[in-house]
Amino acid sequence: MSLPPAKTRRIDPGAFRRSTILVAEGDRGLRRTLRDVLLGMGFPSIIVAGTAAEAIRQLIEFRPSVILLDHKLPGNGDGIAFTRRLRRENDPVPIILMCTNPDAALVATARDAGVNEIARKPLSMEGLVLRLMHVLQVPRKFIRSSAFVGPDRRRLPDRRRNERRLQMPLPPDQERRKRPSRRSGDERRKPKTPNP
């Protein structure tokens, strides 16, 4: 899940000041830390929950703008099951799933469940800000179909940006060596003569 380079992004403090965030995290210490960090970022209202049932209650009561969701949230199921439940109910609230060492299978499962972003634990301030900016300032279209409910899984602008980056020439000290062909150009142009 790549984001544009930091120099090209602008943080809109208003996006944070107008938003309510639900922190659904099983670890009490991390919940408190996240609450303090988010208050420092300018979020006016941070709601916390330690279990899936408590998160559902807070979600119904406060209707947050975004959910920071622990992958291993105590209660009925985990963060993926929680996301699936919300998406089955057609709830478009953006979800940032927090997990330790996400592998490709977990990322694919989370994406298919309807997660907007994944944040790796331990969380970095920059990574958290970038993901919050992404879901609040550049939200993806919400898709509702018989096969999938959730944010559009395609990231075409990011893919094009990455393709352009790959096509840019490397600095001279990092140039890739070209593989020599088996035959030189002259040899390829010569017609083959049949053996007698």
Image (cartoon, rainbow, N blue to C red):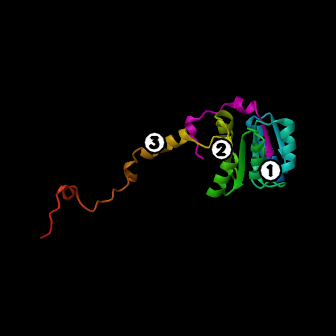
20 or 36: nearer the viewer: 20
186 or 30: nearer the viewer: 186
Q: Count residues near mark 3 (Cα–Cα under 10 Å), then give few for <14, some for 14-19, many for 20+.
A: few
Inspect the magenta stretch and tell me whether residue 8 lies in it.
Answer: yes
Measured in 3D between alpha carbons, the distance from the residue under mark 3 to the one under mark 1, in whole angstroms, is 38 Å
Which mark is on residue 126? 2
Is mark 3 in CB contact (under 8 Å) with mark 2?
no
Q: Quadrant of the C terminus?
A: bottom left
Q: Kindly identify which residue carries mark 3.
A: 164
Question: Which element carries disc 3, helix, strand or loop?
Answer: helix
Q: Count residues near mark 1 (Cα–Cα under 10 Å), then give few for <14, some for 14-19, many for 20+.
A: many
Question: Which element carries disc 2, helix, strand or loop?
Answer: helix
Where does the image place residue 32, in percent across and percent down from the top left? 82, 47
Q: For the residue marked with disc 1, what is the amino acid?
A: Glu
Quarter of the image for residue 23 reads top right
Which residue is found at the position 67% from the left and 53% from the top? 109
Q: Kindly identify which residue carries mark 1.
A: 25
